[in-house]
Image: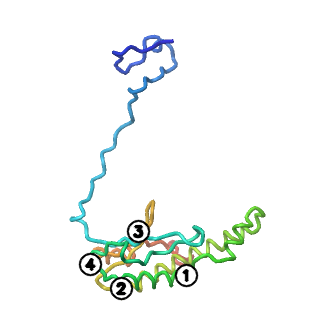
């Protein structure tokens, strides 16, 4: 067994150089891969203020609901607490038909029988499409009622709903910003 001495410069011991097998790296001297430069941090002052609407899981984690409590959100003087509460409650009410119900829970619980699981997956895909459509319609109604503001759904690793000031560049990109996927089969592109 070859024990590296304390003056090791990160190379493999001489015995390991003669064989084709790679040497075991010395602990404490493992070099990491190429370092990526850190992402630039945007200063909050350079960015337009926006309200990130928090959401919580409902129906056992099958759905989500937006939190309408204005005390937990920094409103940046874009909306009054009453306006925020009314807008989020209205959006939650509009999304209610797209949520799961008792039938979906029963089908999911009886999943080991496989047939109910297939029925649940069909219902779930229809609910997802309905929820996207209802969210889009709710954002359109909010944007029409508040011409100085823009409500948009930001997609990413963790998707979230935001309310921000409407500028010419944000309105030109569409009413929803990043949510521009076709919702039904009629909107597909050729």
Element assignment for label 3? strand
CA neighbours of label 3 inside 10 A, class few (<14), some (14 to 19), many (20+) = some
Where's residue 1, x and y in %? 51, 12
> Which numbered marker is on residue 96?
1
Which of the marked residues, 3 or 1, is nearer the chain's N terminus?
1
Task: Determine the residue positioned at 44% across, 73% down.
Answer: 180
Identify which residue, 110 or 81, lies in the foreground.
81
Identify which residue, 21 or 76, lies in the foreground.
76
Task: Determine the residue positioned at 45% across, 59% down.
Answer: 157
Is residue 138 left or right of 117 when viewed as pictured?
left
Q: Are marks 3 and 1 in contact (CB under 8 Å)?
A: no
Is residue 179 left or right of 123 when viewed as pictured?
left
Q: How far is the residue under mark 4 from the one under mark 1?
A: 29 Å
Is residue 138 left or right of 50 when viewed as pictured?
right
Q: How far is the residue under mark 2 from the one under mark 1?
A: 21 Å
Where's residue 182, x and y in %? 50, 74
Q: How far is the residue under mark 2 from the one under mark 4?
A: 12 Å
Q: Which residue is mark 4?
A: 77
> Which numbered marker is on residue 82?
2
Q: Which residue is mark 3?
A: 154
Which of the marked residues, 4 or 3, is nearer the chain's N terminus?
4
Where's residue 8, x and y in %? 36, 17
């Amino acid at each position: 067994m070859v024990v590296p001495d304390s003056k090791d410069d990160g190379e493999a011991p001489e015995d390991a150089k003669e064989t084709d097998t790679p040497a075991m790296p010395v602990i404490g001297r493992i070099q990491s891969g190429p370092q990526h430069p850190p992402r630039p941090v945007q200063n909050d002052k350079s960015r337009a203020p926006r309200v990130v609407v928090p959401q919580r899981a409902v129906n056992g984690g099958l759905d989500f609901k937006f939190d309408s409590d204005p005390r937990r959100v920094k409103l940046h003087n874009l909306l009054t607490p009453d306006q925020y509460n009314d807008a989020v409650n209205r959006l939650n009410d509009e999304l209610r038909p797209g949520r799961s119900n008792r039938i979906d829970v029963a089908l999911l619980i009886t999943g080991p029988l496989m047939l109910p699981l297939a029925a649940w997956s069909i219902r779930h895909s229809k609910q997802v499409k309905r929820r996207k459509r209802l969210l889009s319609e709710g954002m359109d109604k909010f944007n029409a009622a508040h011409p100085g503001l823009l409500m948009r759904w930001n997609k990413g690793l963790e998707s979230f709903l935001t309310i921000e000031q409407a500028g010419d560049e944000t309105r030109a990109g569409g009413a929803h910003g990043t949510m521009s996927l076709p919702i039904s089969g009629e909107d597909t592109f050729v």
